Amino acid sequence: MIPFIVKVPGINGLGKTKGCEKAGNAVLKSLNEIYSNEEGKQINTKLLDLEEIHLDNSDLEMTNDLIYKNAAKIFSSKPRAIFLGGDHSITYSLTRAFLDHCKDESRKPYLIIFDAHPDCMEAPGSPNRVFPTHEDWLRSLIESGFPVSNILLIAARNSDESEISFLKKNKIKSISMNQLLEDLEGVCDAITEFSSGNELYVSIDIDVIDPAFAPGTGYIEPGGLTSREFIYILQRINRIKCLRAVDLVEINPTKDKENLTVRLGAKILSELI
């Protein structure tokens, strides 16, 4: 199955994520240097089913509306999609469209998030921010009605006190870095069991990977996964039949070193094709 690839160059990081809008083009350009993925499947970028949602990041209302409407059409017409961000704020509108699509199809939506941060910050002076940023999109999604029992947060390793309280209050399932390292195979089995038989959306913030392997992002956090560990996890996830969508966000080419992060993004994309 060749997934539908969509560039979503949206940013709403309060000025902290400027540059992430360039990631989609950079990753696809780097993909040209990958001849095949690790399963031996040949990568020919000319044959990709590719589209871009054209956004104006100065108009957040229009940006979120366009992301939601385009995603809704994609979920209703494509068996699998990959969304290339952009920063993590795009995931709010994407997953809201995913949630509504699943409701229309009488399916259960499940969400797995790979992120060094929970992205559940409470916006100062505005707990119910109209247009969520990359720091509070998950909190906003939960407050919008995404079922908390169907969310799994993996590898978060730097959380604000208010985020910890919010996650505990909502009983969000999580897998820590230490759990991953103690039993990587067992965690992959648990991920498969968690999502079995349900519609699955996977969101990947590149900062889940240690900055030694992915320095080109806004909020680097030491102690993350190696690129090899993450590729293995991703390969296991890609076998899940109910996987409907993946987003890859927070790659910032303007902050990259020797193109390491962009190339890793291309590697991740190749393993999903």
Image (cartoon, helix red, strand yellow):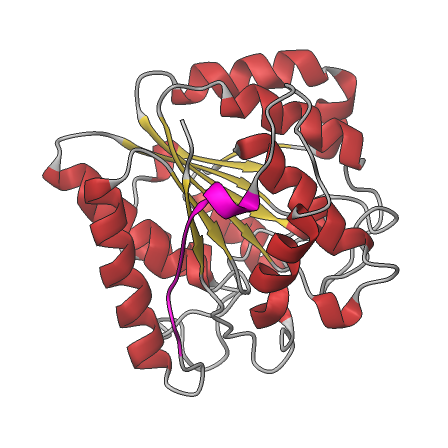
Instruction: Tell me if residue 147 can be seen.
Output: yes
Instruction: Tell me if residue 130 can be seen.
Output: no
Magenta part of the protein: which range? 45-55
Question: For this rendering, which residue is in front, 90 or 40?
Answer: 40
Residue at far bottom of view:
58
Task: Return the x and y of residue 126 as percentages of the image width and height.
Answer: 40, 78
Task: Return the x and y of residue 265 as percentages of the image width and height.
Answer: 67, 48
Question: For this rendering, which residue is in front, 226 or 131?
Answer: 226
Q: Is residue 47 magenta?
A: yes
Task: Return the x and y of residue 259 as percentages of the image width and height.
Answer: 81, 58
Up the image or down, 42 lies above or below 163; here it is above
Picture residue at 74% right of the left edge, 44% below the top: 209
Picture residue at 22% right of the left edge, 52% below the top: 72
Task: Give left or right: position of 263 versus 266.
Answer: right
Question: For this rendering, which residue is in front, 152 or 185?
Answer: 185
Task: Return the x and y of residue 170 as percentages of the image width and height.
Answer: 41, 43
Q: In which quadrant is the N terminus drawn?
A: top left
Task: Give left or right: position of 149 versus 166.
Answer: left
